[in-house]
Image (spheres, helix red, strand yellow):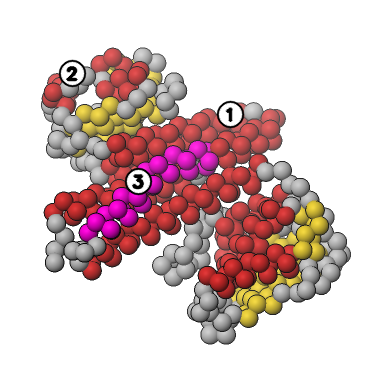
Amino acid sequence: MSVPAEPKAELEALKNLNRAQARLVQAVQELSLVRTVPAIQEVVRRAAREIAGADGATFVLRDGDRCHYADEDAISPLWKGQRFPMSACISGWAMLNARPAVIPDIYVDPRIPVDAYRPTFVKSLVMVPIRLAAPVGAIGVYWARPYAASAEEVALIQALANTTSVAMENVQVYTELEKRVAARTQQLENLNRELESFSYSVSHDLRAPLRAVNGFAELLTREVEPVASEKARRHLATIIEEARRMNELIDDLLRLARVARQEVRRIDVDLAEMAREISDRLRREQPGRNVEIVIPDTLRATCDAGLMKVVMENLLSNAWKYTSRTAQARIELGSRLEADGSVAYFVQDNGTGFQAQYADKLFTPFQRMHSAAEFPGTGVGLATVQRILHRHGGRIWATAEVGRGATFTFTCAGSDAARS
């Protein structure tokens, strides 16, 4: 039995919203790495058009009392390189009023200078300010047909604009660093705080539309279940699963941001007891797996218990995940004395492993050795682990061989000899 037309339309809308959400996450990642305004413009003009599913996008900068159409990505030329009075264009209106302009039909909206649009393909648009407090620019998306953007679509474009403002501020900081070498250390510390704030605020900006995607997908699943085809049910399941995975990424970004700000409170901790609790949970979640987990009776460390729980969760969960295709899976937690008398702890497995020359990339956010289709994950966990251990004055490194497993070894400054 076919799905009724209305649920089909709702399903398509949810799929498009989920696609736009994923594209926004990609843009957030790209903007966190750029260091020049032209690079920001390149990322934003492409991302804005793809997020909106539009026929064109512009990146507008405020230049005194004028709007500078600095860059564009469109099916035909718009106004790249031109400047207009703030009072004479819709980008100026969005900046002066510090709020989005949603215009389904440009020919009936009095804010639009129609003569400037007649030579273009534009029939409808959305214009959002870059930064709501004292806007510094605007992002416009355009359609070659009458189109009324939904509130969710506008929220996604505004989230991109909010992210853009933070990226532009970061560029300004880096420019100032080049001019003031003597103050480099202090300014870099300020930048790190800004980047942490950036991750935290962006993650929160993403949650509202993500909840809408997930909630409406679940409602639609229940509504069309009796009449939906198997293909439609698979599409709905994919939407829900991708929303869940995106929520995990947001959580990981928040966790990574929190680690830099959290105070380290050192106490005597038994890593072995912590590992047993984690392994028991892993077994409960997948009772069908037969994994040998070797944990010493006791394994002491002087560390922050909460932060070290995050370290152990990530390392043991990774070992559990990457041994899922190993017939006789084995995971071991242990320790050894280094030449300088310090204690090194390790989590070792006999799972899928990886090419050893890429080991350092594991601790960079969003860098993964395997695709999400092979092994689920966000690529943020090990970056969080490294940051936690650095906060403790320790370090982490990995050794591995493809098909023969991996070993993650870490130190935690302040721990004496291991007692096992």
Residue in view at x 61 percent, y 37 percent: 193
Residue highlighted by disc 1 = 176
Q: Is residue 195 magenta?
A: no
Q: Which of label 3 and label 2 is nearer to you?
A: 3
Q: Where, by quadrant of the figure, is residue 418 drawn?
A: bottom right
Quadrant of the rendered structure where residue 83 is?
top left
Q: Which residue is mark 2?
A: 110
Closer to the chain start, of discs 1 and 2, is: 2
State the image coordinates of residue 18 (x, y, percent, origin top left). Answer: 33, 51
The amino acid type, in three-letter code, at marker 1 is Glu
- Check the picture and name the quadrant holding the C terminus: bottom right
Give the side of residue 255 with respect to residue 393, left or right.
Answer: left
Tag nearer the camera, 3 or 1: 3
Residue at the image point whose x is 48% and y is 36% from the top: 167
Q: Identify the mark at residue 212; answer none if there is no mark.
A: 3
Q: Amino acid at mark 3?
A: Ala
- Residue 233 appears in the rendering: yes
